[in-house]
Image (cartoon, grey):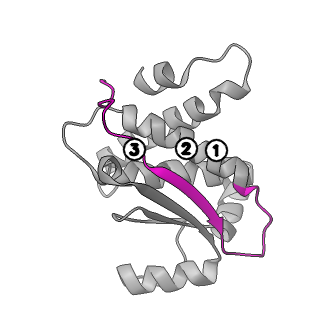
Amino acid sequence: MRSKSKSAPSPEVSVRNLQRTIPVNVGDLEKFAAKAMRCCLRLHNQKATDLTRLREVFIWLISDRRMASLHRQFLGKTGPTDVLTFQHGEIFVSVETARRHARVFRNSLVRELRLYIAHGLLHLHGFHDRKQTDARKMERMQKRILLAATADRYKGSTSLASTCLN
């Protein structure tokens, strides 16, 4: 996989917590999102994507109630979902759904939220998960991004670039 051209700057990323039910460390998630975005941009992609064209990416942490409303409004589906991504650079994450899924999959809430952020960024970078083969590829990329964007926390870990590109 080749790296992205150095002439195009990375989009600015911001995380905003609009729900008040579950405490989250927004600063930690914003740092992760910035690293995850750089990793996404290093992934080989033949064509320009929404992520390569954007100047800003907004990640909104919301309640299940708000997510269910968006899910119904934009996809015509009832109930909340985990993450919704819009091509203009908005990623909506349900913190309540993340907490439920974290318990089911025996993850921490932070790891589950990071997974959803990586998932949304990959959608902006042209990845899809409607077909089983695409979903598996996207899942592998999510794991690489999670590993790479948290690698500097662990002594002796690989660099962001090498983890993303291997």
Q: Residues within 10 Å of mark 2 (few under 14, many from 20)?
A: some
- Discs 3/2, front: 2
Residue at numbered disc 2: 34
Q: How many marks?
A: 3
Residue extending farthest to the left is 47
Query: Hey, what amino acid is under mark 3?
Result: Met
Residue at numbered disc 3: 138
- Discs 1/3, front: 1
Q: Is residue 94 above or below residue 104?
A: below
Q: Report the Cα–Cα distance between label 1 and label 2.
A: 5 Å
Query: Is 21 included in the stretch rendered in magenta?
Result: yes
Residue at numbered disc 1: 31
Residue 85 location, x and y as percent? 42, 64
Mark 3 secondary-structure assignment: helix
The answer to whether residue 103 is left or right of residue 113 is right
Do tag 1 and tag 2 residues touch (Cβ < 8 Å)? yes
